[in-house]
Image (spheres, rainbow, N blue to C red):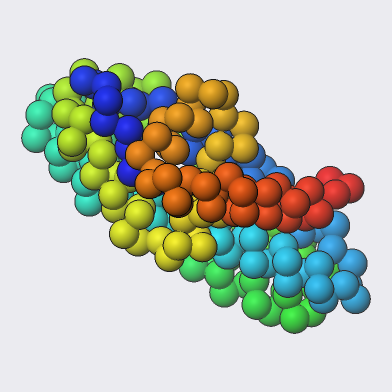
Amino acid sequence: MDADTTSDRPLVQQMVVIHRVFRREFGLLPALIRGVAPDDLERAKDVADHATGLLRFVHVHHSGEDELLWPVLLDKVAIESDLIMRMEQQHEHVAALLPHAQEQLPAWAAMPSPERGAQLAATFEEIASVLNEHLGEEENQILPLVEANLTVEEWSRLGQHATASLAPPELMASLAAIVEEADAEERLMFTAALPPPVLTMFVEQAEPAYRERMRQLRAGV
């Protein structure tokens, strides 16, 4: 998931496309959870596995920003302290909610009662709410500063962090989620640097498998 480095400025649209995944998937999860029948353990497991993958993805994304974006940006730009404080507080709020969701998921998947489903769905609604506020402010306030002040190499470290942190199946699923609604230019931002054998595997195997899984998962929602 390394960034394409052919531009002389950071391709901050990459972040917007990744944010699109979080808005879409965390927005859908509460309905997916509430739609599982109490006796449908197979469906509950599929939804729980999907939710677990999303929690992992957002954790890796935010940890990369905490480690590789905020310090570099603060070193280069005189940013208002309240802006960075809000960014950090939003990350901390999400970080506090992720373990709560992770703790709820196994019990719900083992017994997807309406009561447990309502509690789990409410947790994901809170995650989505905090994320939406954070993502919008990051796009409006932070990304213009990134584009103007960070080098392509500094920006690419975020993608390298994700590549190093996620297992190959997680990477392929995350990439498929990222390009699901991407236009041709956005897709190229994420696939241009893939080695030809990896790109072939992604296009011919991983991406179709992801799309079929999402078709089944989202059926009726």
Q: Answer left or right for 35 relative to 12.
A: right
Against 79, residue 215 (above or below) is below
Q: Position of residue 215 (x, y in %)?
A: 78, 48
Against 191, residue 140 (above or below) is above
State the residue in front, 199 or 140.
199
Residue drawn at the location 89% of the way across and 48% of the way down:
220
Displayed quadrant of residue 104: bottom right
Q: Position of residue 3 (x, y in %)?
A: 33, 37
State the residue in front, 87 or 110.
110
Against 85, residue 205 (above or below) is below
Residue drawn at the location 48% of the way across and 45% of the way down:
199
Against 119, residue 200 (above or below) is above
State the residue in front, 109 or 43.
43
Q: Position of residue 95 (x, y in %)?
A: 42, 58
Residue drawn at the location 18% of the way across and 37% of the way down:
154
Is residue 188 visible in the rendered image? The answer is: yes
Displayed quadrant of residue 217: bottom right
Q: Position of residue 87 (x, y in %)?
A: 33, 39
Is residue 83 visible in the rendered image? The answer is: no
Residue farthest to the left? 75
| Picture mark count | 0
Displayed quadrant of residue 157: top left
Q: Answer left or right for 78 relative to 58.
A: left
Residue drawn at the location 50% of the way across and 60% of the way down:
170
Q: Answer left or right for 204 relative to 164.
A: right
